[in-house]
């Protein structure tokens, strides 16, 4: 297939002509959608380390109306400043391409130096709940179901006081209750802040090597809306860790959910779930802890997907500038090989600093593509590295199949060509037209909503899971879709990317296939449900033990 680049007539659109019949346009619709969020990092000249982080972006359906809403995590001012406190912002999807800010009175309007978050129904009551990580303590908000939340942190016992970053809800012990893994960064406070400099005597942001790391935390859900800290008992106590990104995966296909954690200047970790309440770090043995040269990189965001149809999860990791992204292919023998250095991905990301990153099928051809949100941490980096910039453009890599990717590069002031100090990134079908849209945050800058136009020229099936014996959201379920003679699979998951979370419903691109031969769902409980012979271009809901309970046609906007 010939793949061509086409320039759009609209300055804010990135147009990719993948064939004569298919073109995909990412259009910046932030302003017309009513998104007016600007991240606050509190910077006032002191160069405090946390100012380089924020912030996370979450897609979630807070009122269960079938439209994905937006939660944008925010920082706030430091105590030394005389400034109005800021907080996270919740946008309700109006279903017509616009969003309404419903933060006031939502229960989420609590000032905190927020960093990231994860959302799921932790108490199985049918309402989405939100956990926000912060420069301690973190907050757990229980969803009421009408778009409002109640702070239940103290009673639940999950107010981790550390410098918390990425987090995931997952059921590590398969008891039907979602547990909580929280990544932590370093021991830092304004009182322990150090003076660091890139050049002359001007203070710059310190690197993480200057500070002691913090162990992640695992909270076990007791099933009564309280949690217990089982970090040490589970074998996850790692005092040297400096975690940023967290991704769920089943690395070995044993149906127990494992975790991958990116660490900043420390070895990345692959925690294999042993199925007995404990984990072991197999990162070194699997070849994912260090770079090919044996160096611990500055890992930021991460995602896990089977990008080549092998049946095994692979990894994409955002790293620091001059380190390139990592694209780890799962060889199926316990080892991963980083394919980035020998691919266009490595060459294209050598000078970028990638934070948010994820796999998603933007053109619905059945092959997961890659999105990367980029931006440096040092606002004065160009003084010492002339080829590296503070603001950097996002990147989109198209999956050509057979393990090959090509970067989609556009010019003429297009949406994906506009530099930003990118941080969090997440995807969802925001307008319910079948293709996946992208939300990106910027450090101390405006968030951007990029609408996918034309990605639904191919066919699609979207799947929502409802657990019964398993957790209500079906998190950890393996969903397989067979269409056109090919079988693809995904894991229902939370977290991933950088401090962010994409939508829970799964999107399977079908290419030219107009029907689905079969859908198979393997639930955490061990229950397996199979649905046969479905038309394409539907959102289907599968309930554990019952099977298909709902099917809604997708209005494919052209």
Image (cartoon, grey):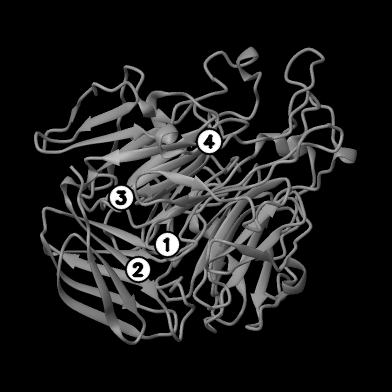
Q: Residues within 10 Å of mark 2 (few under 14, many from 20)?
A: some
Q: Which residue is mark 1?
A: 504
Q: Which mark is residue 368?
A: 3
- Element at label 3: loop
Q: Nearer the viewer, mark 3 or mark 2?
A: 2
Task: Please give the label number shown on residue 148.
Answer: none
Q: Is disc 3 in contact with disc 2, using a CB cutoff of under 8 Å?
A: no
Give the foreground label among 4 and 1: 4
Question: 229 or 178, which lies in front?
Answer: 178
Q: Position of residue 32 (x, y in %)?
A: 40, 34
Mark closest to the chain's N terminus, 2 or 4:
4
Badges 2 and 1: C-beta atoms under 8 Å apart?
yes
Q: In the rendered structure, which disc, 2 or 1, sits on the residue that comes first in sequence?
A: 2
Q: Above or below — where is 287 with respect to 8? A: below
**Residue at image mark 2:** 464
Q: Disc 2 on helix, strand or loop? A: strand
Task: Give the CA distance from mark 2 to mark 4.
Answer: 29 Å
């Amino acid at each position: 297939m010939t793949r061509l680049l086409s320039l759009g007539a609209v300055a804010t659109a990135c147009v990719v002509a993948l064939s004569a019949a298919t073109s995909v346009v990412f259009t910046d619709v932030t302003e017309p959608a009513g998104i007016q969020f600007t991240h606050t990092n509190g910077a006032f000249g002191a160069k405090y380390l946390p100012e380089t982080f924020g912030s996370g972006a979450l897609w979630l359906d807070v009122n269960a109306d079938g439209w994905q809403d937006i939660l944008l995590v925010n920082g706030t001012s430091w105590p030394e400043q005389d400034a109005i406190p800021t907080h996270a912002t919740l946008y309700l999807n109006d279903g017509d391409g616009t969003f309404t800010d419903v933060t006031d009175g939502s229960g989420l309007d609590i000032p905190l130096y927020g960093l990231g978050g994860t959302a799921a129904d932790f108490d199985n009551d049918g309402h989405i709940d939100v956990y926000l990580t912060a420069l301690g303590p973190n907050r757990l908000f229980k969803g009421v179901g009408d778009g409002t939340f109640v702070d239940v942190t103290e009673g639940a016992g999950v107010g981790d006081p550390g410098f918390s970053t990425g987090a995931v809800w997952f059921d590590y012990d398969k008891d039907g209750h979602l547990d909580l893994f929280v990544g932590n960064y370093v021991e830092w406070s304004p009182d322990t802040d150090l003076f660091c400099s890139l050049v002359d005597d001007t203070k710059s942001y310190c690197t993480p090597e200057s500070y002691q790391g913090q162990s992640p935390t695992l909270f076990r859900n007791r099933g009564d809306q309280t949690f217990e800290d089982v970090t040490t008992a589970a074998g996850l106590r790692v005092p040297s860790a400096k975690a940023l990104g967290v991704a769920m995966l089943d690395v070995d296909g044993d149906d127990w959910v494992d975790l991958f954690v990116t660490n900043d200047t420390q070895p990345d970790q692959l925690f294999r779930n042993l199925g007995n309440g404990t984990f072991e770090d197999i990162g070194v043995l699997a070849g994912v802890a260090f770079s090919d040269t044996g160096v611990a990189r500055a890992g930021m965001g991460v995602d896990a997907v089977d990008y080549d149809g092998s049946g095994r999860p692979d990894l994409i990791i955002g790293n620091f500038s001059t380190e390139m992204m990592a694209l780890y292919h799962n060889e199926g023998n316990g080892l991963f090989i980083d394919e980035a250095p020998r691919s266009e991905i490595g060459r294209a990301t050598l000078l970028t600093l990638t934070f948010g990153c994820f796999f998603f099928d933007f053109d619905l051809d059945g092959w997961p593509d890659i999105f990367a949100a980029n931006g440096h941490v040092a606002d004065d980096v160009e003084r010492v590295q002339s080829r590296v910039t503070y603001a950097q453009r996002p990147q989109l890599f198209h999956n050509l199949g057979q393990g090959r990717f090509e970067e989609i590069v556009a010019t003429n002031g297009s949406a994906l060509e506009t530099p930003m100090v990118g941080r969090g990134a997440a995807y969802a079908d925001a307008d319910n037209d079948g293709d996946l849209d992208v939300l990106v945050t910027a450090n101390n800058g405006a968030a951007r909503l990029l609408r996918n136009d034309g990605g639904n020229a191919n066919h699609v099936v979207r799947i929502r899971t409802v657990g019964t014996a398993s957790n209500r959201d079906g998190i950890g379920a393996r969903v397989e879709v067979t269409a056109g003679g090919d079988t693809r699979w995904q894991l229902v998951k939370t977290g991933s990317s950088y401090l962010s979370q994409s939508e829970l419903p799964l999107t399977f691109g079908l290419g030219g296939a107009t029907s689905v031969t079969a859908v198979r769902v393997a639930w955490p409980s061990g229950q397996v449900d199979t649905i046969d012979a479905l038309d394409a271009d539907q959102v289907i809901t599968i309930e554990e033990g019952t099977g298909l309970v709902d099917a809604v046609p997708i209005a494919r906007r052209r």
